Amino acid sequence: MYNNMRAARQAFTRESADARRAALIEATAACLAEQGLAGTNVRAICAKAGVSPGLLRHYFAGIDELIAATYRATSDRMEAIFAEAVEAAGNDPRARLSAYLTASFRPPVTDPELLGAWTAFWALARSDARMARIHAESYAGYRERLCELLEACGAPDAGRLAIMLTAMVDGLWLELSLDPASFGAEAAVAMIERAVTALL
């Protein structure tokens, strides 16, 4: 009985720690979205999360580690969203490819708050080695999955097409996020579909 109680306490402690880390990561993403890199600091993050700076230092070595963890968590979330879109599209290879590419123009990826965090991550990836590694891993995974979907459609030179289509999706998503009046999400989807049809 004592061992069972101790195991239960340990499980509760792990869950509590995971919840606190997740809350700090969520607060960091919110700060980046609302205030950008310049306004994202320990004080702002802790105020957003409703915790003391000491708690942040307990779970993370510092703000750089926390921002890196936030980038990784955001990337993992996006990967899960894209995977769910593909599975929801059924078994048709072309439909699965379209779902993967156009998920970037559907909620929740089109959430305006995501832009601030994502552009901050991109900026940091240019000067921070750890952020650059996370960026490289994230984009390599996206392109690898896209390449598989292109190959399933019989696309020639799928690797190069994956690079090109990734750049197109990124460009349209960024422009749509910065200036939604210029064109809408459905227009972006139509442009992607037209490009894919021309390339396959």
Image (cartoon, grey):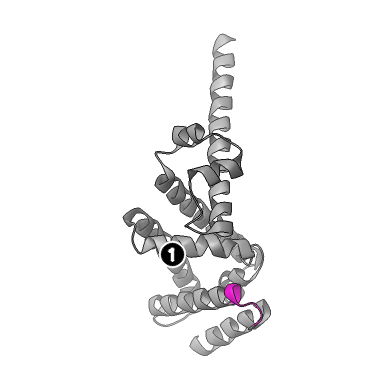
Q: Quadrant of residue 132?
A: bottom left
Q: Is residue 99 visible?
A: no
Quadrant where the N terminus lies? Answer: top right
x, y percent for residue 170: 50, 73
Residue pictured at 42% horizontal, 83% vertical: 156
Please provide the residue range marked out in magenta. 176-181
Q: Is residue 103 visible?
A: yes
Q: Is residue 102 magenta?
A: no
Q: Quadrant of residue 63?
A: top left
Kind of residue at badge 1? Trp
Residue pictured at 44% horizontal, 75% vertical: 162
- For disc 1, the marked residue is 122
Q: Is residue 135 above or below residue 61?
A: below
Secondary structure beneath disc 1?
helix
Front residue (pair 26, 2): 26
Residue pictured at 50% horizontal, 77% vertical: 171
x, y percent for residue 187: 65, 83
**Left or right position of 103 against 200:** right
Q: Is residue 110 above or below residue 187?
A: above
x, y percent for residue 99: 61, 71
Front residue (pair 43, 50): 43
Number of residue marks: 1
x, y percent for residue 6: 55, 16
Q: Is residue 113 above or below residue 55?
A: below
Front residue (pair 189, 178): 178
Q: Is residue 177 magenta?
A: yes
Q: Is residue 143 above or below residue 37?
A: below
Category of crowding for the residue at label 1, using alpha-carbon neighbours closer than 10 angstroms: few (below 14), some (14–19), many (at least 20): some
**Left or right position of 58 against 182:** left
